[in-house]
Image (spheres, rainbow, N blue to C red):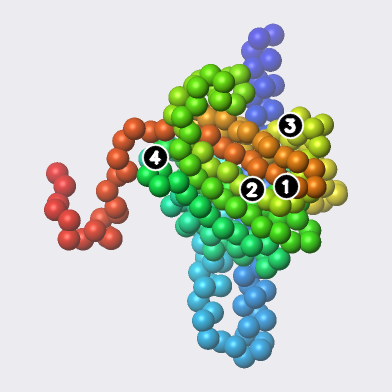
Amino acid sequence: AEDQLRQSQKMEAVGQLTGGLAHDFNNLLAGISGSLELLQIRVSQGRTADLDRFITSAQEATARAASLTHRLLAFSRRQTLDPVPTAVDRLAAGMSELITRTVGPSVTMRIASAPDLWITRVDRNQLENALLNLCINARDAMPDGGSILIEAGNAALDEKAAPGHDMPPGEYVSISVTDTGTGMPPDVIERVFDPFFTTKPLGQGTGLGLSMVYGFVRQSGGQVRIDSAVGHGTTVRLYLPRHRAELPPPEPESNAAAAPRA
Ligand code: ADP
């Protein structure tokens, strides 16, 4: 009976993960389709200068989609994260183009970071998916436009400050997405991490975004906190454990002059 229970829990996890990947996959397809549409408009207007970035953006999204399917295949063996030392402000900055395009022109986006930001150790693909999901939720909460602030900071938390009861006090890197949208009433906040919970119209929400974000952050040793006020907006803040180490040296190709390593 215990085996059966374990098996059914495993199947449930597989279902949640594949549903989650489908959700991310659809987000990427939407991005690719958007880039192609812009490309088509430009070409039909004869404005053929500076088209590279639309092509690059579609190519990047395609590469990310390929990495998603690879992970899905990898999961048929085991669900693994690939954590590496990461500066989350740099990771967010690297996504600004993709996010800006995804949230559309009615939403302004800004990234801010504390000085001397600590390093965390995290699966970068998963963190990128998480941030994109949070920004899409932010956009959906601002149908008449608004602004998104992505903020990275250092957080030394004692017992009182650590969010949730299952997060040890300690040093964390925080990354938050704040919007000026509709906000959420308490009964919604209570359920947002439940898989398939959505308040969006049929066909527009899967209810998997935040449950995936939550699953990934918990698996990374962190915690998620939501602050929201109806009519004012929402902050979703991820806490990721500080990693006490230097970032690895830059990639060899961008560092050709460096001394050879053993
Ligand atoms: P989905 O976006 O597909 O509905 P999520 O798990 O990402 O699934 O979100 C669940 C629900 O949480 C949303 O349907 C919405 O009601 C609420 N929500 C999430 N993020 C926000 C936000 N930034 N502002 C307002 N409501 C939000």
Q: Is mark 1 within 8 Å of ligand 1?
A: yes
Badge 2 crowding class, 10 Å Cα cut-off, few under 14, some 14 to 19, many 20 or more, is many
**Residue placed under numbered mark 1 in the picture:** 233
Helix, strand or loop at label 3? It is: loop
- On the image, which quarter does residue 21 sit in? top right
Badge 4 amino acid: Ile
Helix, strand or loop at label 2? It is: strand
Helix, strand or loop at label 4? It is: loop
Residue 26, visible in the rendered structure: no
Among numbered discs 3 and 1, the one appearing first in the sequence: 3
| Contact check, label 2 and label 4, Cβ < 8 Å | no
**Residue placed under numbered mark 2 in the picture:** 178
Q: Residue 114 in the image: x percent, y percent?
A: 45, 46
Residue 2, visible in the rendered structure: yes
Badge 4 crowding class, 10 Å Cα cut-off, few under 14, some 14 to 19, many 20 or more, is many
Among numbered discs 2 and 4, the one appearing first in the sequence: 4
**Residue placed under numbered mark 4 in the picture:** 119
Among numbered discs 3 and 4, the one appearing first in the sequence: 4
Query: Mark 3, mark 4: which one is toward the viewer?
Result: 4
Q: Is residue 185 left or right of residue 53?
A: right
